[in-house]
Amino acid sequence: MIIPARSHHLPAINNIYNQAVADSFRTAHTNPVSPDERKQWFADHSPSTYPVFVYLDDETVLGWLSISSYSKNRQALADVVEVSYYIDYNHHNQGIASALMEHSLQFCREYGYRIAVAILVSDNKPSIALLEKFGFSEAGRIPDGLNFDGEFRDHLYMYKKL
């Protein structure tokens, strides 16, 4: 079941995200995100305009997807959003990311957003495959833009017109 996230989901959301941080090359964070940082992040996501969705099995969060402002306070980009998603590593390859993406893109269309953008590490092949499955295309990249303690990766931008 996919529902809008609530504050009591934040510990699970943060744990799932920090799995990706620990794995390296899945996010640009190299240090775990603290609970306080996650609370501030969540406060910046209005449920009506920039929601965070969670995929639940009973009451257990198995994954999440956030819709965020692509470039906050820049009016010409108001109808462009960024999507970010993370799935608990114990539940990869179960269709959770696809369900979250389908649900979230439908929300974006209904809300009237025009373009969805995803920004990721170029080595993240599973995410690239998921985005391509949903019609995202590469928009550009910053070669060697990400520095993981001297190991460089491209910062990849993908987009989809809604």
Image: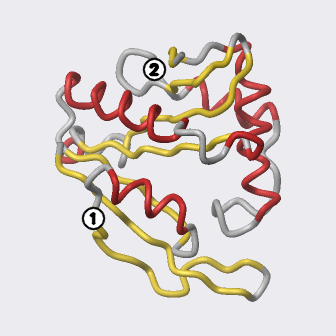
In space, the residues marked 1 and 2 are separated at their CA atoms by 27 Å
Residue 93's place in the image compared with 109, above or below, is: below
Left or right, 140 with reference to 35? left
- The reply to whether discs 1 and 2 touch (Cβ–Cβ < 8 Å) is no
Mark 1 or 2: in front is 1
Q: How is the image coloured?
A: secondary structure
Looking at the rendered structure, the kind of residue marked 2 is Ser
Residue 118's place in the image compared with 108, above or below, is: below
Residue 87's place in the image compared with 117, above or below, is: above
Question: Image quadrant for the C terminus?
Answer: top left
* x, y percent for residue 124: 57, 67
Nearest to the observer: residue 154 or residue 128:
128
Nearest to the observer: residue 14 or residue 87:
87
* x, y percent for residue 30: 77, 63
**Residue that appears at 54% across and 16% down:** 1
Looking at the rendered structure, the kind of residue marked 1 is Ser
Mark 1 vs 2, N-terminal side: 2
* x, y percent for residue 55: 58, 24
Q: What residue is shown with label 1?
A: 137
Residue 35's place in the image compared with 116, above or below, is: above
Left or right, 73 with reference to 95? left
What is the quadrant of residue 49 in the picture? top left
**Residue that appears at 51% across and 26% down:** 52
Q: Secondary structure at mark 1?
A: strand
Q: Secondary structure at mark 2?
A: loop
**Residue that appears at 75% across and 88% down:** 150
* x, y percent for residue 90: 77, 42
Most extreme residue toward the front is 94
Q: Dot 1, crowdedness within 10 Å: few (<14), some or many (≥20)? A: some
Q: What residue is shown with label 2?
A: 46
Nearest to the observer: residue 20 or residue 10:
20
